[in-house]
Image (cartoon, coloured by chain):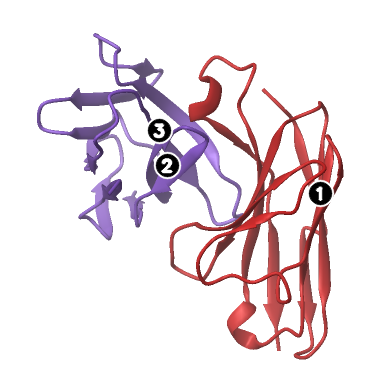
Chain colours: A red, B purple
Amino acid sequence: SAVISQKPSRDICQRGTSLTIQCQVDSQVTMMFWYRQQPGQSLTLIATANQGSEATYESGFVIDKFPISRPNLTFSTLTVSNMSPEDSSIYLCSVDGQGGPRGSYEQYFGPGTRLTVT
Amino acid sequence: AQKITQTQPGMFVQEKEAVTLDCTYDTSDPSYGLFWYKQPSSGEMIFLIYQGSYDQQNATEGRYSLNFQKARKSANLVISASQLGDSAMYFCAMGSNYQLIWGAGTKLIIKP
């Protein structure tokens, strides 16, 4: 399975500012995913990022608010722009499980970034 | 539409007892995978167990087993001999074609 790291692990930010979260994988992967988990809620997919193409956003999420970069097959960033307290969440990066025992069904997760907006 | 339902928002269980967390799913895909993840207060998602739609036997991983009833579209997680460290959120998810569909989660609290 892939080993994924995220930076920062947590942050406290002022409203109106932006934060960029980094996701690094120890092997080349095709698909990377960004999730948001609001307090007490389940995971919600923000977007899917493939290398060399624009990210695909889910309903309710827009590029201006959550710009994503995917410069190569091992790295991605998610920016949370013009933050408000409603953006306080855990943000999780995951990668597809291709090459693993459960193939396209599975995703491997990073440790998450806990964001608090004041 | 694909959907995962976890009907237990929270559960309290005495230490050393077994616990069953419920999960039902809905899909028209013949091929899919069912997952259980544990999320402690630290926030990381920890993979527990997996069941493929074509697997004939129920999956087991140590103290975790998955009670897979395909006709009823249920995939309940059974934790035997619960421990204080099992206190966490538990999520059921269904994987199909590079997508994971998530349940709402169950908060499990183990009482000493």
**Dot 1 corresponds to which residue?**
A76
Q: Dividing the picture into quarters, in which one does residue B16 lie?
A: top left
Chain that bears disc 1: A
Chain that bears disc 2: B
Question: Label 1 crowding class (10 Å Cα cut-off): few <14, some 14-19, many 20+?
Answer: many
| Image coords of residue A23 (percent x, y) | 80, 48
**Residue at far right of view:** A71
**Residue at far front of view:** A53
- The reply to whether the C-beta atoms of the residues labelled 3 and 2 are less than 8 Å apart is no
Residue in front for this viewpoint, A59 or A15: A59
Residue in front for this viewpoint, A96 or B57: A96
For image coordinates 35% across by 57% down, the residue present is: B104
Tell which circle, 3 or 2, labels the residue nearer the N-terminal end: 3
Q: Amino acid at mark 1?
A: Ser
Disc number placed over residue B86 in the picture, else none: 2
Q: Amino acid at mark 2?
A: Asp
- The reply to whether the C-beta atoms of the residues labelled 2 and 1 are less than 8 Å apart is no
**Dot 3 corresponds to which residue?**
B35
Determine if marks 2 and 1 fall on one subunit: no
| Image coords of residue B34 (percent x, y) | 36, 31
Inter-mark Cα distance, 3 to 2:
17 Å
Observer-side mark, 2 or 1, equals: 1
Observer-side mark, 3 or 1, equals: 1
Inter-mark Cα distance, 2 to 1:
32 Å
For image coordinates 43% across by 65% down, the residue present is: A41
**Residue at far left of view:** B72
Secondary structure beneath dot 2 equals: helix
Question: Label 2 crowding class (10 Å Cα cut-off): few <14, some 14-19, many 20+?
Answer: some
Residue in front for this viewpoint, B9 or A3: A3
Q: Is residue B94 toward the left or the right of residue A98 in the image?
A: left
Determine if marks 3 and 1 fall on one subunit: no
